Image (cartoon, helix red, strand yellow):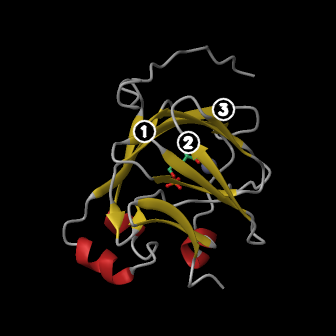
Amino acid sequence: MTLMLPFTKMVDLANGTIPGGQDIQVRHLADLKGLFADSAAESALLPENPVIYRVYLGAHQPEVVGQLSFSTTVIYPGKVGEEYFFTKGHYHAKGDRAELYFCLRGEGILLLQTREGEVNVQHMTPGAAALVPPYWGHRTINTGQDEFAFFACYPSDAGYDYAAIAEKGFASLIVERDGKTEMIPNPSWL
Ligand code: PAN
Ligand code: ZN
């Protein structure tokens, strides 16, 4: 066994980034193509191809049992049609791996769903620590006017299953109607 040395990374609490982090993933609208319910609104916005969110990885950890990884996600404010900007959303490839989210700034929703279609909503404001239990697919949504940022800590071997969400989406949509945030049934949910 090689003993790993402890380390510390600073999260910038003002903007939710990890300045000394090892990797930044940038997700543009084109990377989320087909995920927003209003495909006409999505197509109209595609030429502009805005950045929807960035993920700041703390460090590259070995993807093995026992290791923890951490990152922050910053979702920018905006909508596609009436649907707020969101992350792609995934189940963990190893479904029994949990995850902890901690809200740093802004406001948003953690939308969770089981493979059987049970939906759960957690409201995220700065200081909120929200648990993603094993087997729940998860997506975060920026319902505010400002950037929404949260810290995530997860088992390094959890992995990502994006396909199930890409194919079926979530059973519920989070939209703005008459200036209010509402959860409505996804009309194309089977
Ligand atoms: C998070 C997410 C991050 C981006 O770190 O990976 O918020 O969301 P997508 O991966 O769905 O694009 C996490 O849940 N890791 O397991
Ligand atoms: Zn996850």
**Label 1 CB-ligand 1 distance < 8 A:** no
Asked if residue 1 is positioned above or below residue 182 in the image, the reply reads above
Q: Residue furthest left?
A: 48
Mark closer to the observer (3, 2): 2
Q: Is residue 100 visible?
A: yes
Tell me the kind of residue under disc 2. Answer: Met
Q: CA gap, disc 2 to disc 1?
A: 8 Å
Mark 2 vs 1, N-terminal side: 1
Mark closer to the observer (1, 3): 1
Q: Which residue is mark 2?
A: 124
How far across and down, in percent of the image, does residue 71 sit? 51, 36
Q: Residue furthest front?
A: 178
Asked if residue 76 is positioned above or below residue 58 in the image, the reply reads below
Q: CA gap, disc 3 to disc 2?
A: 22 Å
Q: CA gap, disc 1 to disc 3?
A: 25 Å
Q: Which residue is mark 1?
A: 106
Label 1 neighbourhood size at 10 Å, few (<14), some (14-19), many (20+)? many
Residue at 38% of width from left, 31% of height from top? 17
Tell me the kind of residue under disc 3. Answer: Leu
